[in-house]
Amino acid sequence: MKEKLNQLLQKKITIPAVLMMLVYLAYGLLIPWMGFYWDDWPFAWFLNFFGPTEFIEAFRPFRPLLGPIFTVTTFIFGGHPIVWQILGLVIRFLLALEVWSLLRKVWPTRQESALWVVLLFTVYPAYGQQWVALTHVNQELIPLLFLLASFIVTTHLLRNGLRAKRLTALAIVLQALGLFSTEYFFGLEILRFFFILVIFTETTTDKKELMKKTGLQWLPYLIVWVLNAVWTYAYYQSTAYNSYDISILSSSMLSPLALINEFVTTLSLSGFTSWLGTFNSFATVDGSATQVIAFVILLLTAFFIYFVMRAQIEKRNTGNVTHNTQHESSFGRWALLIGLIAIFAGRLPSWAAGLPLKIEFDYDRFFVSIMLGASLFIVGLADLTLREGRAKLILLSVLIGMSTAYQFTVANTYRRDWANQQDFFWQLAWRIPALEKNTALLTYELPLKYVSDLQLTAPLNWVYAPELNERNIPYVLFYLKTRFDTSSLKAGEPIQLQYRTVNFNGSTSNSVVIYKEADGCLRALDPIYGSAETVPGANIYLINAIALSNLELIQIDVPDLILDKTLFGAEPAHGWCYFYAKAEIARQQNDWEGVVKLYKQAQENEFSASMPVENLPFIEAFAMTGDTDMAIKLTERTAKAQEILCPALSTLWERVSRSQGSSAGVDTRLQDACKP
């Protein structure tokens, strides 16, 4: 049985199958519940409303040669989120195959070591944006495919020496496609030099001759690399460019202390913290379904990789292969050296732009250019310290298993965020059936992790302007914390946005302030019913903005919104937040009987407030319709659940008193409920 298993594991199809399994376990299990994140939203919106060619102009001020990639891929694959998630898996699998092909050509007698690198590269844990698929497949992964393919052609040329001119031309074309389309992989070109150097060390011992041969072989690519550097710098300094500034010439960045700090930070994050951080998934045992599944993935992956790699080692030891012992023994040193160089080469573009390297969204995208270097580094380190013993086999198998399980846990956070995005837009549709044009939605921040205000502006217009055919978008969503300062939060101030090829022109006087806590319903605030007293502890930006909120911009007597099911899912079952949203609309129309009716319907369905503040419209409705006892009971319940709402409750009853006359007995019971 063991012999048959070893024979199976040694078949040519085994490695691609293992890589496919690894990609699926790490990134694919939750794909049916994934969607759009971050810049996926505006890219999908541009595609839907203006077509694939829009990307040419949209990327002109940022990465002018990246637009054609978006144009071609979106023309072929369209804009369905699941299609892009699947395409992301395919591209990730192809990248793994490319690294496997490349490293086998560089170290043909150390295929099992090359495979360790490929496996770690495939599930590298610091890069956690696999699921921002529409954006990163085009923006990074496809250019990386081109660059790695260029490396493969170069090494193939060196190993075979056939049709040198044609292969060199092909390698240069692929190099240009990988480098000129995006700056992410600019530094990685240096790896070609070292791959050539490694290959030439097999036949050339004289160091001077070795460097000369390597330099001459690399020269055509060096010329393209220099041209790319000149073009990139010239374009970034031109008036056509409108994105990150180049900060590399800053004296503060080039100071010895800053360089040492950057060196230590980059190496520790890329080479150590990224791998060790995977163990945090199991630091606390919570028994959740996510943790249980992750643990199963860990065991399955680690054991399977252990047996696969053991079979590869046995195949190597028993094969009739002539080994270059000196060349083989140098693998660890080469892998460690090239890995270190690749780590810092991959960091170069983001460092030059003055952007921090962090293992957190959305800065973790910069690790996409560090993945290969970090994987070479850890395998080289293991090779030098653990040699070929069982300890290395176990350690790296466990590390791959942990990284695969970790990526699954990250995938689950994306799944939850997509569900939260859909829930947000359905609640928005319930509360705001339609909006006057040129309205800005303002909020401090929303409880969404993988999308921000500028990205949410795209689906906002998708919902409220589904027939848009002009460049002036009618709606915008802004986070107060990033788009304003406290001095600009006053009426009549312009709100303008130029986002790639579209514009918004509005005013702070035409704005609606919304608010949503993670566990609560979406609310539209206003100075009367949704004043600062109803959001105790909220940020000062939000508090100051409430005075600007004009709920008259919300159109009520209109048909219900129809949201695209592909993007927003089917309308959720009507739970508490649905009844709350409709009650807020009824209150906005002074339909107090309607508010009471909605509360009773919610009670009949056994729904209750998700947060105490959501009782306020119903308290006021019961009081305004004469059911004072119910209003007082609900008041006492609210005050007991969240005493900090007592000022809001007091203000509410003052309004009732002014409208209905005396509220005898209420003050005493309110004081009892709110006394310290």
Image: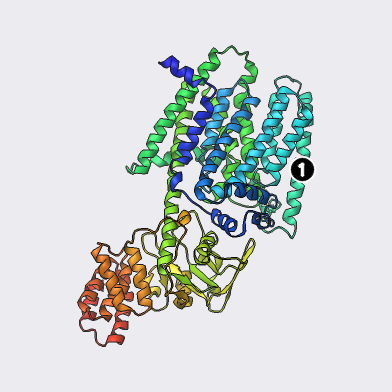
Q: Residues within 10 Å of mark 1 (few under 14, many from 20)?
A: few
Q: Is residue 200 above or below residue 497?
A: above
User: Where is residue 404 shown, x and y percent of the image?
Assistant: 46, 37
Q: Would residue 130 be visible to someone looking at this image?
A: yes
Residue ID for mark 1:
226
Instruction: Name which residue lies at 37% across and 64% down.
Output: 521
User: Where is residue 360 shown, x and y percent of the image?
Assistant: 51, 49
Query: Tag 1, which secondary structure?
Result: helix
Instruction: Name which residue lies at 52% across and 44% down.
Output: 130
The total number of labels drawn is 1
Q: Is residue 250 above or below residue 582?
A: above
Image quadrant for the N terminus? top left
Of residue 57 and residue 77, the one placed in the foreground of this image is 77
Q: Quadrant of residue 584?
A: bottom left
527 to the left or right of 179: left
Disc 1 marks a residue whose amino acid type is Val
User: Where is residue 617 shown, x and y percent of the image?
Assistant: 32, 74
Q: Is residue 217 above or below residue 498?
A: above
Image quadrant for the C terminus? bottom left
Of residue 181 and residue 554, the one placed in the foreground of this image is 554
Q: Quadrant of residue 619?
A: bottom left
